[in-house]
Image: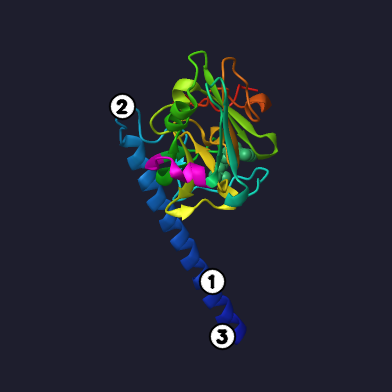
């Protein structure tokens, strides 16, 4: 049997197996990178890749209620336990000292991205300008439609915690929090509020959107603090 339809069927088969083989090669390459990252150590001695995570190349859009992406309408309030509250528009944010940050990102759904590049302003910069009071213990990130996340002040004021407006050299995309999001690389990514509207310094903890829905209050990827264990 060598009919046109059979030939079509056979060529379809080989095209199909080529796609399967390419997909398989991709998986193997990715597994190698994942294994290498597991063996690599960070400067703090922890493995580059936290337990249970696998590598992908670019952050994935994970949803959420999108805020207004227009820089023109953007305002960021830095408030709470501070000497002088700040209310910054986009130009005022860009006028502050900017840093280029390269960091690893870990999502609780188990993907990680190594060496993600961000541009923005350090939380320590905002804290210094607002004059954070010594009584402040936690930072609450506030975002569009009431999304919040809570971070211990010493973790929010780590040198790699920033508010970012660029990812991989481009203005932040809407799905990733345009125009500005928080980045706290050493905690699971849900702490990194997108469509950021406020940074509030408080004394008493205020568990946020996911933290009041069963996610772990602290979210350390190396301790796999994913959920409260429901
Ligand atoms: N405002 C806001 N920020 C948010 C969320 C959200 O729903 N709303 N989701 C969080 C969660 S659960 C994750 S995993 C990351 C995902 O960021 P990404 O979509 O840029 O990958 O954003 C976090 N920031
Ligand atoms: Mo998430």
Whichever of callouts 2 and 3 sits on the residue coming sooner in the sequence is 3
Numbered mark located on residue 45 in the image: 2
Q: Secondary structure at mark 2?
A: loop
For mark 1, what is the residue? Answer: 13
- Dividing the picture into quadrants, the one containing residue 40 is top left
Per the rendered image, the range of residues in magenta is 91-103
Q: Secondary structure at mark 1?
A: helix
Residue mark closest to the camera, 1 vs 3: 1
Question: What percent of the width, then of the height, locates residue 143?
Answer: 63, 37
- Dividing the picture into quadrants, the one containing residue 46 is top left
Q: Is residue 69 visible?
A: no
Spatial CA distance of label 1 from label 3 is 15 Å
- Dividing the picture into quadrants, the one containing residue 6 is bottom right
The colour scheme of the drawn protein is: rainbow
Find ligand 1 in the image and state its quadrant. Answer: top right
Q: Is residue 132 left or right of residue 74?
A: left
Q: Are marks 2 and 1 in contact (CB under 8 Å)?
A: no
């Amino acid at each position: 049997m060598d009919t046109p339809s059979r030939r079509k069927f056979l060529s379809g088969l080989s095209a199909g197996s080529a796609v399967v083989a390419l997909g398989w090669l991709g998986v193997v390459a990715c597994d190698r990178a994942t294994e290498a990252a597991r063996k690599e150590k960070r400067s703090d001695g922890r493995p580059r890749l936290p337990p249970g995570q696998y590598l992908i190349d670019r952050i994935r859009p994970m949803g959420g209620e999108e805020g207004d992406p227009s820089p023109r309408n953007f305002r960021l309030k830095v408030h709470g336990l501070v000497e002088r509250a700040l209310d910054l528009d986009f130009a005022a944010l860009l006028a502050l000292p900017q840093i280029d940050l390269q960091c690893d990102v870990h999502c609780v759904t188990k993907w990680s991205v190594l060496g993600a590049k961000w541009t923005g302003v350090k939380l320590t910069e905002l804290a210094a300008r607002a004059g954070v009071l010594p009584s402040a213990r936690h930072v609450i990130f506030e975002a569009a439609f009431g999304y919040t996340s809570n971070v211990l002040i010493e973790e929010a004021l780590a040198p790699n915690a920033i508010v970012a407006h660029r990812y991989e050299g481009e203005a932040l995309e809407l799905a990733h929090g345009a125009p500005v999001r928080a980045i706290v690389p050493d905690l699971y990514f849900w702490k990194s509020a997108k469509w950021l509207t406020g940074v509030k310094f408080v004394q008493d903890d205020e568990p946020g959107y996911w933290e009041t829905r069963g996610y772990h209050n602290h979210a350390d990827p190396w301790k796999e603090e994913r959920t409260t264990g429901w």
